[in-house]
Amino acid sequence: MKGKTIMVIRILVILSAAAMITYGIFRGEVSIVMNKAASICFECIGLGK
């Protein structure tokens, strides 16, 4: 019984994560995240502003 409960919780967490990722993609947040990631990366290696 305990193993089944853990499996159900894992599946629910994965499904909710997939739903949030899909929602973010449809809102157009991919470009925002990529711009911030590139900015941080360039600052770390000394090419930033």
Image (cartoon, rainbow, N blue to C red):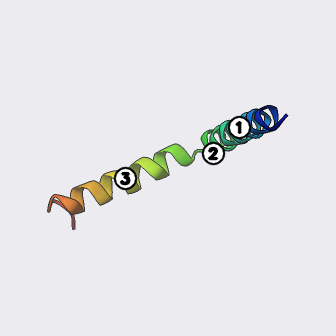
| In the image, farthest residue toward the left | 46
44 and 47: which one is in front?
44
| Marking on residue 31 | none
Q: Which residue in the protein does label 2 denote?
A: 24
What x and y, as percent, mark residue 36?
A: 40, 56
Q: Residue at x 68, y 36 (%)?
A: 14
The residue mark sitting in front, 3 or 1, is 1
The kind of residue tagged 2 is Gly
SS category of the residue bearing label 1: helix
Label pair 3/2, CB-CB below 8 angstroms: no
Q: Which residue in the protein does label 1 denote?
A: 10
Would you say 35 lies left or right of 29 here?
Answer: left
Label pair 2/1, CB-CB below 8 angstroms: no
SS category of the residue bearing label 3: helix
Per the model, the C-alpha gap separating discs 2 and 1 is 21 Å
| In the image, farthest residue toward the right | 1
| Marking on residue 37 | 3
The kind of residue tagged 3 is Ala
